[in-house]
Structure formats: C-alpha cells, structure tokens
Amino acid sequence: MVISEKFKIYSEVFEVFLMKDIVRDGDPVLRKQAPKVKFPLSKEDKQLAHDLMEYLEVSQNPELCEKYKLRAGVGLAAPQVGVSEMMASVLVPNEDENESDTPLFKDVIINPVIVSSSVQRGALTEGEGCLSVDKDIPGYVPRAARITLRYTDVDGKDHKIRLKNYPAIVCQHEIDHLHGVLFYDHINKDNPFTKSDDEIFIY
Ligand code: NB4
Ligand code: NI
C-alpha cells in the first residue's frame, strides 16, 4: 500500500486481512508453540510479513479502519491469521503529534527471543485486548517493564535492541502468541486489578 500523507492520496491497491481472517480464541493454532522461520525467507513468508504489517497500517488509519470494519491493532502475530510460525508485526505509533511519522517501534520480528527482562514489572493502565479474543477481559497484565529483544527482520538482518514501556509491552504480547500464550493467562483470577509494589503503569 502506498500512502502519500502529503497529498492524502491512498492507493487502495492492496489486499488486507479482514476480521474474518483473524483466528479466534478456541482455535488450537493459538495455543501451539510456533516453529522457527527458516532463512532465506520463502516467497510466502515474505508475503506474510508484508501482509501482517499492512493490517496494522490500514487498521491505524481511521477511515480505512472504519471502511473495512477492522479492529485497530499495534501488533499482529502469524498464528492469529492461522499460520504457526515465529513471526509478528509490530507498529507502535508515536502519539506525540510532532513525531507522528516516526513510530516508536515498527518492524516485522522473526524468530524473536527476549534475552533479558527487567525485574521491574509494568502493565498498561487500560489492560489489554486481543484481536483473537472477542470479549473484553478486564484486569492488569503484568509484564516486564523493559526487555532486550533479539530478532531477525525480513531482510535477514539480526537485531538486538532494548525496549521499554509501551513498545516492550506490545512485543511481549506478540511473542506470547508465538508460544501459545494469551494475555488473559497473566491476569490474576482472584483479583484482576492487583498491582505489586514494584509494578509501574504504562500509558
Ligand atoms: C495487541 C496489543 C494489546 C496490548 C494498546 C493498544 C490496540 C492490539 C493487540 C498490547 C499489544 C492486537 C496482537 C490498539 C491500540 C493505540 C494506537 C493508533 C491509531 C488506533 C490505535 C489504537 F488498537 N491496543 N489494539 N489491540 N493483538 N492500543 N491503539 N492507536 O493491538 O491481538 O496480538 O490507530
Ligand atoms: Ni493478541
């Protein structure tokens, strides 16, 4: 998809995943450990990487999101479109208006590994939602506030990066999908809004 912001021209020559393509909770693919992706990437894997990112771009465009009746997303993992592979797209926009063209984090992460996690925990104040889970499940989802992440991108380049706050939370949600874990697995069942002393809120 080509979006020229300057001229507000949207070339709509694209095929984007729709909500009907998103696998819902209860499908065994969401509970599987995804196998690693082999390099060099096959044509299909390259296409999948592209399509996973395109969903996020389209869903974050208010007009297109409405037009195609999508649920907005900042991440999408391959198992959520029925493909059990260690691949996920992440697009965390910068909410700062002046910096809105430079996302806080944008990449397709392949074979990601969290090599270290901070002791400090963090949770999104609003809790989490998942495109594969139709109902709202309230509660804090405690995660590491900071992580060091290793992954390979679509070009086969290896990355080792440190992430904190919002992008760190999103990547942990996506990596969980690759291991068959869903966000509500982390919610304290007896007291969904318990917060430990060393836990911070992330907006
Ligand atoms: C993944 C996220 C759930 C919590 C936090 C948030 C949204 C998802 C799921 C952590 C990761 C998808 C993938 C949003 C959203 C803020 C940014 C930019 C403009 C609207 C958009 C709304 F849509 N979660 N949805 N859920 N998942 N923030 N934003 N905004 O992304 O299931 O596994 O467009
Ligand atoms: Ni999800």
Image: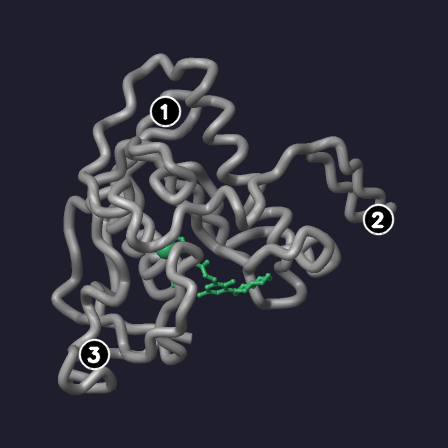
Render colour scheme: one colour
- Residue count near mark 1 (Cα–Cα under 10 Å), binned few <14, some 14–19, many ≥20: few
Q: Which residue matches tag 3? A: 199
Measure how far apart labels 3 and 2 are at the Cα level: 42 Å
Residue type, mark 1 in image:
Lys
The x and y percentages for residue 85 are 30, 31
Say which quadrant the N terminus sits in: top right
Kindly indicate the quadrant of the structure image that contains residue 38.
top left
Observer-nearest of 47 and 137: 137
Q: Is mark 3 within 8 Å of ligand 1?
A: no
Question: Considering only order in the chain, which callout, 1 or 2, is on the residue closer to the N terminus?
Answer: 2
Locate ligand 2 by image quadrant: bottom left
Side of 59 relative to 23 (left or right): right
Observer-nearest of 141 and 191: 191
Residue type, mark 2 in image:
Lys
The x and y percentages for residue 149 are 26, 45
Question: Considering only order in the chain, which callout, 2 or 3, is on the residue closer to the N terminus?
Answer: 2
Side of 85 relative to 199 (left or right): right
Q: Name the residue rendered at 47%, 14% in the picture.
A: 43
Q: Where is 131 relative to 197, above or below?
A: above
Residues under numbered marks 2 and 1 in contact, where contact means CB atoms less than 8 Å apart: no
Q: Which residue matches tag 1? A: 157
Residue type, mark 3 in image:
Glu
